[in-house]
Amino acid sequence: MRFSKLAVAVTFGMAFASAGLPAIEAADVERDVKPSAEQTLMVWGGAMDVAWFDGPMGLLGLTVERTPNVKANSHRPQFDTLGLQQSAGLQIRVAGLDFVGFAGGQLQANGGYVLKATGGLFPHDIDLRNFTLRPRKDNPLQLDVVSADGKAWFYIDRMMYKIEGGSSPRMIVRAMDLRVSAEAAAAAGRPGIADYVVAALEMGSKIASDSVVLPSPKGSSKWPGTAAPNGGTYEADVFMQTFTGQWMLASGEDGPGGADGIVVYTPSSTLRNNRANGTSTVTIPSDPLGTSTAPWAADVVWNTKFTSPTAPYNNDQHPYLVWNLYRTNADGSIEQIGQSGVKHAFLTINVSCDENPGNGHILGRGCSDTYGTGNNNSTGDLGPRNEIIPATGQWGRCGSVYDKNCNNALDSGAPCVNSSDPSCSTLGFRMRVRESDLDPAINPGASFRFESWYVVREDISIYNTMASRPVSINWAAGHWQLTNGSPLLLGPAIDQWVSRTTSNPNESSSELAVGDGHARVAVKVVDLGNGTWRYDYAVMNFDFARAVTTGSEAANNLSVLRNHGFNSFSLNLPASAAVNSTKFSDADDNAANEWTAVREGNALVWRGPTDAGIASNGLNWGTLYRFSVVTDMAPTDGSVSLGVAESGSPAAFNVDALVPSSVIPPMFANGFEGVGVR
């Protein structure tokens, strides 16, 4: 579907996008937009889609009761649809391609909800029938949701606006978060849940004026690999700018010492494209990884899945977002306790740009973009990691949960119609964490770290596209509440466990960087003081996969059959060494798929299970496994081996690491090293 050349994305603030609405095609727009005078537009009427999140609503003690005017959305069953009245309008101010703020007015729903106070927390029902949207007095980029009592128990932010021109101009809000106001949280006796996201919203409204004057930009000439001035080349290098995590929902959650339910956490993640325009330029200030090595920033394509193929890859290429949770135990070891599926990106907001492309399907140079908590919890944008070739950023659409029969069309009811998970619509592809992994009685002295990162095709540095931050998790107000800590640092979480530049003689951290992707092996060695040492190895597979595929991108039928990473981990261990204990930890709670440790000559080897010769619990991309051993051998420099799950050459990779040795190295010498040493 094509739009007039007037079509342009108008974006602002912490905005983002949603699938299901037609996209602007790159060929329809022009580039190098000049700033234009500010103008005020009036929007009115239309419709709104609402997806309530039962988990956060339950924390308020509220349940949702729909009025007759609220209809089910046949294409996306998690959403309701209701109309917006045409009796009034909402004014927005636009300058060129930038949203300046709301100027006044209001929009009123035609129908709505009654939020019933059934949980014994909120003192009364909230009447959201015919609710009104009004600009917030203290923030022109947010909207209050005003109920029948005249109060704003909720507010809206993280909005993304898109204006489409032509004979019937309209404004589309592609995504927005409905959040709990401080007053509502206090009324429920739970002030700590203020600002929690309780629903995801979308909206489409008419523009009352047919004289809208907007720039007419066009598609990029600065794709990765194209020529830049002075013999340079444009290169993709996207940075994670910031993110925050939030408790979203749970299943069987009952607190410490209980039934070991499941908890789901979801981030709001903001990125920024490289700012360099011929010289090295800081993109993320005050961070060691905040400056790109690419002197010429490239534009990055940002298509919605199943839209018409566009440059530069002649497909519906888009980035992906993943997130993980780690626990550092009191003994210093690290374990991954949660991992998400893949969030498929579909639109970029392009704010705070150095060069705004004026196209919501191109991330411009120096532009920022946010995918918010509600949108990152939207089932229709999530999928499994095993459909992605992570090192190349390619999605095997053919045979995926969105296109099972490979007809290049979105399956009705996808992704859950093609999933065997009975909890797909609520827990599917989310980051699930067991209560037992959070319970302080089970994990005394533990700390937690949240990690969020984007996978971007042709990105020259995967590490600055990742970030992690400490978080505290405690049982409060009826849930395992997550509080975001500081500092947020670029790079993966494993680098905060053992620095890649560590000078500690009892630590090491080494990278594997090959054509099929990247991994890192870090180790901490603890002298237990009784002639034994504990070696805690953490192996993080960032994007390594020896993918098995059929079809091709060129034929529009690429299918990823498998994208396994590693299926064995081994280290040299003298045959004379005692092995007092071993421990393994993966990122799931399935005791039946644990890797097992065996002695094989002068080696200690952990192997994963197989099914018909195929790895069934491989150390796959975006995943950290822990391998620990207690032995009577002191550490020395050496290497460990990572066995590749799929056949091919090489069958394994050696990575530098501290390993047990029968020779006591200088750091453990005590003057008696020649006596009684094996």
Image (cartoon, helix red, strand yellow):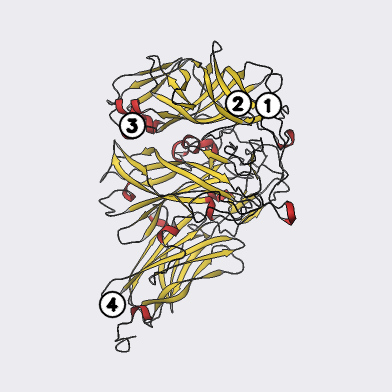
Dot 2 or dot 3, earlier in sequence:
3
Q: Extreme top residue here?
A: 87
The x, y position of residue 314, in whole percent, is: 72, 44
What amino acid is at disc 4? Answer: Gly
Q: Is residue 227 visible?
A: no
Between disc 4 and disc 1, whose residue precedes? 1
Q: CA distance from mark 2 to mark 3?
A: 37 Å
| Placement of 149 over or under 238, stated as above or below | above
Q: Which residue is mark 2?
A: 94
Q: CA distance from mark 2 to mark 1?
A: 9 Å
Q: CA distance from mark 4 to mark 1?
A: 75 Å
Contact flag, marks 2 and 1 (Cβ < 8 Å): yes
Please name the residue shown 55% across and 26% down the image. Answer: 74
Q: Where residue 59 is drawn, which disc sits there?
A: 3
Please say if the residues under marks 4 and 3 sit with CB atoms less than 8 Å apart.
no
Q: Which amino acid is tagged 1?
A: Leu
The type of residue carrying mark 2 is: Val
Q: Secondary structure at mark 4?
A: loop
Element type where label 1 sits in the image: loop
Q: Quadrant of residue 366?
A: top right
The numbered disc on residue 531 is: 4
